[in-house]
Amino acid sequence: MTTRIILSATCLCATLLAASLAAQQPQSTTTPKPSPKDTEVWEPEPRVVSPGATIAEPPSDAIVLFDGKNLDEWVNVKGGGPAGWTVADGVFTVNKPVGNIQTKRSFGSYQLHIEWRVPANITGKDQARGNSGLFLASTGGGDAGYELQILDSYSNRTYSNGQAASIYKQAIPLANAMRKPGEWNTYDVIWTAPGFNADGTLRSPARVTVLHNGVLVQYGYELTGETVYIGKPSYKAHGPTPIKLQAHGDPSEPLSFRNIWLRELK
């Protein structure tokens, strides 16, 4: 009996030792060697968009809002009739007594290119010098909406959140890239429209990135609501909206615009 127990214990120890040694041996792997193709994604294939010949010219998928010929894409905010601003020599000029104009079409998120010029003979100072506004989304009459300020900010000091390229009364531009009066300025805008829940509450705020004459002046700024002259910004629910240009009531000489086009972002 004793001999059998000793033999059994010896066999058990040998078995355990063999198992331990086997566990310490490197295990063979069947994992395939990584390949560059593992991270290649072929679908969907981006659609082809032909760029313009210059940065100012519209790409092939753009909606041209002003081509130098007419204001057929625009209406007067008061009553929705013809825009009523002056078109000549490939540009159009603000007609202050007529009031604001806006696009016939409504948009959500988009990429926008627009060029504007303060006249060389501009007079006035502060906010009364070449004042206008690009409303990235017009939510009603007057100045309702979200305004990217247009102003002569070339050697013309005003409050920082009201100078050219500010999100009016909300966001100071990162730089003053203004050209002198008589020269053309450009805004290139990426606008992300706000989103709203079914009950009208805000789901996601509006965001905007702006280049002024090729200089980054607003970088993914999240708006706290519509821009207002007095008081604090707030949101009210809306869907796609027109884009509006302001006929500001200051007495300075009126601005002009040209080369306006837009790409809708889905």
Image (cartoon, rainbow, N blue to C red):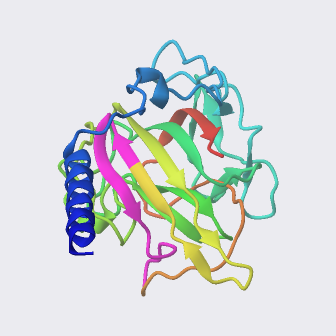
Residue 242 in the image: state x and y as whole percent: 69, 56
Q: Would you identify the image quadrant in which residue 246 lies?
A: bottom right
Relative vertical location of residue 171 with respect to residue 123 in this rendering, above or below: below
Residue 87 in the image: state x and y as whole percent: 64, 33
Q: Residue at x 29, y 67 (%)?
A: 161
Instruction: Please state which of residues 33 and 131 is positioned toward the viewer in this rendering.
Output: 33
Q: Residue at x 19, y 48 (%)?
A: 21
Q: Residue at x 76, y 49 (%)?
A: 105
Magenta-colored stretch includes residue 125:
no
Q: Residue at x 48, y 47 (%)?
A: 190
Relative vertical location of residue 35 with respect to residue 82 in this rendering, above or below: above
Callout count = 0
Residue lying furthest top? 53
Q: Is residue 165 visible?
A: no
Q: Is residue 178 visible?
A: yes
Left or right of residue 107: residue 41: left
Q: Which residues are magenta?
A: 210-230
Residue 106 in the image: state x and y as whole percent: 73, 53
| Quadrant location of the N terminus in the rendered image | bottom left
Q: Would you identify the image quadrant in which residue 77 lies?
A: bottom right
Magenta-colored stretch includes residue 221:
yes
Residue 176 in the image: state x and y as whole percent: 22, 48
Relative vertical location of residue 133 with respect to residue 34 in this rendering, above or below: below
Instruction: Please state which of residues 212 and 17 is positioned toward the viewer in this rendering.
Output: 17
